[in-house]
Amino acid sequence: MTTWKDAPTKSVDVDGVEFVYREIGPEDGIPVVFLHHFTAVLDDWDPRVVEGIAAQHRVIAFDNRGVGGTGSKVPADIERMAQDAIAFIRALGLAKVDLFGFSLGGGVAQMVALQEPELVRRMILTGTGPRGGGGIDRMTRIVGLAYAKAALTRSDARNFLFFPRTAEGRRAAAEYLTRLGERTSNRDKKISLQARRAQLKAIVQSGKHAPDDLSVISQPVFVANGDNDLMVASEHSADLAERLPNSKLTIYPDSGHGGVFQQYRTFVPEALAFLAEASITTEGDR
């Protein structure tokens, strides 16, 4: 199997806009489409998670409209982000996919399932919560403080946002950021200032939006987070699982927003088992 660091960057025309993407894994079966977090581009996916899922599934990760190497501008609401994601999936000729949404990507994945339910078989939603879940003002302050600390220490803000500031958390952060640097050539374009601002506006609007009726999402959903998420409070992930009628919830101990990256050795097998299940119960897995 091609490793994530060696995966070629491809492109597809979506209504006149070139969308860039990478894919690895077997060609048969239902693919897993990855939807990424605030300010992230293709190079920000953890190789161990991508390669772990790709051991059994075709994995497709892409830059949505205006992100990284994809053209145009980022829309300032998650409904339009979802519409663009749907258009990308359709442009690849796919009729059914599984979705893996992390953080902002988890919000977009929910919108995809609400807008085009027939397109989605299963979803994995990590480090995310329901629209209108509250706490958006708290998150904005935390993110601002983390970026200030990162600037002062000349380090990556994800050290402060994704991982607990414990000895184990610091070690996990260092290993995660090292993994992100494994790809040394043909790297993606950095996120633009316009994309950052539009994504932040979309996140704020989502936090203040009226809650969606998630009871209409009948697909099986695996919700996961760390037990100390500073960006999306861990209880919001629990709330999300409660609102979804066919869900499974896992909260990883001693972990933060990036809990699935810190605990990838546990998360990947759980994700593969979930994707392989014929059905899922509602209460027994909570």
Image (cartoon, grey):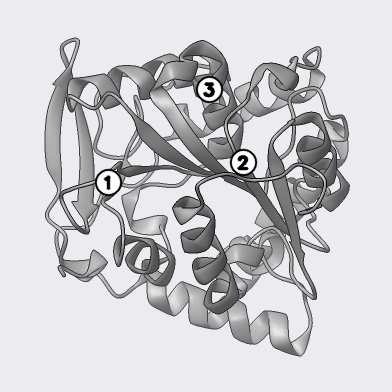
| Residue at (74, 89) in percent of width and height | 167
Percent across and percent down for residue 36 are 47, 43
Query: What is the distance, in whole Å, between disc 2 and disc 1 at their CAs?
Result: 32 Å
Looking at the rendered structure, the number of numbered marks drawn on it comes to 3
Quick one: 208 or 54, which is closer to the camera? 54
Determine which quarter of the picture holds residue 208.
top right
Task: Give the quadrant of residue 131.
Answer: top right
Disc 3 on helix, strand or loop?
A: helix
Q: Is residue 75 left or right of residue 31?
A: right
136 and 118: which is toward the camera:
118
Badge 2 or badge 1: first in the primary sequence? 1
Residue with the mark numbered 3 = 113
The answer to whether residue 173 is left or right of residue 4 is right
Tell me how far mark 3 sits from mark 2, CA to CA: 11 Å
Give coordinates of residue 252: x percent, y percent. 74, 68
From what the image shows, is residue 67 above or below residue 268?
above
Front-most of 240 and 127? 240
Name the mark nearer the viewer: 2 or 1: 2
Identify whether 19 is placed above or below 17: below
User: Disc 2 marks which residue?
Assistant: 221
Name the quarter where the N terminus is drawn: bottom left
CA separation in Å, label 3 and label 1: 29 Å
Give the residue at x 36% y 68%. 47
Q: Earlier in the sequence, mark 3 or mark 2?
A: 3
Q: Does dot 1 land on a helix, a strand or a loop?
A: loop
Label number found at residue 205: none
Residue at mark 1 = 189
Residue 152: give x, y in percent of width and height.
Answer: 66, 67
Q: Amino acid at mark 2?
A: Val
Q: Amino acid at mark 1?
A: Lys
Which residue sits at x=30%, y=17%?
87
Q: Name the amino acid, label 3.
A: Ala
